[in-house]
Amino acid sequence: MAVNEELLKQTLEVIRPSLQADGGDCAYVGVDEDGVVSLELQGHCAGCPMSQMTLSMGIERILKEHVPGVTRVIAVNDMM
């Protein structure tokens, strides 16, 4: 199932203020054909030891609930 990128971006805009309140942020990088969303964690989120928990229990959970086709969320910062 193809992910509706417009809905995905709108949902991320709802999530971002929570990240920004703690000095962090995220930037949308893309989504692949398997529904894996790539985000760049920024600010305090980029170096935070809790970033994986924020991704899986926060951002990923919300995106899976609200955007059909999302299967996983990864941080591109962590892949480098």
Image: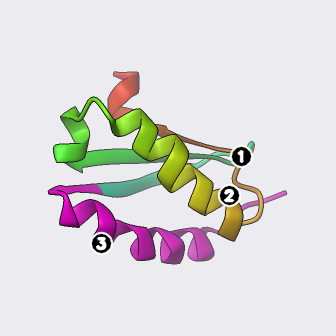
Q: Nearer the viewer, residue 48 or 27?
A: 48
Residue located at (22% from left, 48% from top)? 42
Q: Which residue is mark 3?
A: 17
Crowding at label 3, few (<14), some or many (≥20) Cα neighbours within 10 Å? few
Q: Which residue is mark 2?
A: 64
Q: State the quadrant of the C terminus.
A: top left
Callout 3, which amino acid? Pro
Choose the circle earlier in sequence order: 2 or 3.
3
- In the rendered image, residue 28 lying in the magenta stretch gets the answer no
Q: Which residues are magenta?
A: 1-25
Distance from label 3 to label 1 (Cα)?
23 Å
**In this rendering, the label closer to the viewer, 3 or 1:** 3
Q: State the quadrant of the N terminus.
A: bottom right
Q: Is residue 79 above or below residue 35?
A: above
Residue located at (22% from left, 64% from top)? 20
Label of residue 71 in the image: 1
Distance from label 2 to label 1 (Cα)?
7 Å
* Pointer 2 with pointer 1, Cβ within 8 A: yes
Quadrant of residue 45 in the image?
top left
Distance from label 2 to label 3 (Cα)?
19 Å
